[in-house]
Image (cartoon, rainbow, N blue to C red):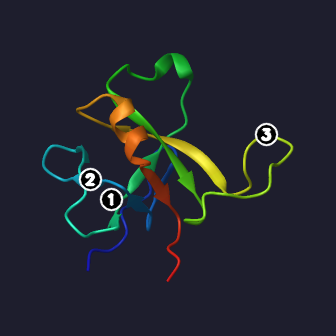
Amino acid sequence: AVGPLPAPPEGVHVYGLYLEGARWHPTTRVLAESEPKVLYAACPVLWLKPCRKSEVQERRCYHCPLYKTAARRGTLSTTGHSTNFVVDVRLASSVPESHWIARGVCLLAQLNY
């Protein structure tokens, strides 16, 4: 097993997330179709780095919702979001965002088993 990465100069590394409805292609480093009969795919380590919106590079990506659980529901909080919703994560994609939306792709912090 590979140990944890050294702390980044800014932000944090996030481990242990799962992709539902897609997988990460390690060679092309973009979202890819799920393997047959695979419901959940391990997500690689993500580097969440704070930056100004004006500093974000424009590229083809999918704004992937991250949920605490696979239930994808929760109580509506005062912020207007579900209590199960955590954040949108920009994941590189070689196809339009609508492709992944139609498949219901999301990130999960835990599985139900």
Which circle marks residue 24 in the picture? 2
Q: Where is residue 83 in the image (x, y as percent from the top left)?
A: 74, 55
At mark 1, the secondary structure is loop
Instruction: Say left or right for 45 vs 72.
Output: left
Is 51 rendered above or below residue 87?
A: above
Q: In front of the other: label 3 or label 2?
A: 3
Marks 2,1: beta carbons within 8 A: yes
Q: Nearer the viewer, residue 92 or 21?
A: 21
Q: How many labels does the image show?
A: 3
The residue drawn where x is 32% and y is 59% is: 44
Q: Position of residue 67 (x, y in %)?
A: 58, 57
The residue drawn where x is 53% and y is 77% is: 112
- Which three-letter amino acid code belongs to the residue tagged 1? Pro
Quadrant placement of the N terminus: bottom left
- Which three-letter amino acid code belongs to the residue tagged 2? Trp
Marks 3,1: beta carbons within 8 A: no
| Local crowd size for mark 1, using a 10 Å CA cut-off: few (<14), some (14–19), many (≥20) | some
At mark 2, the secondary structure is strand
Give the residue pinned by disc 1.
Answer: 44
Q: Where is residue 35 in the image (x, y as percent from the top left)?
A: 20, 62
Q: Which residue lies furthest to the top in this view?
A: 54
Which circle marks residue 80 in the picture? 3
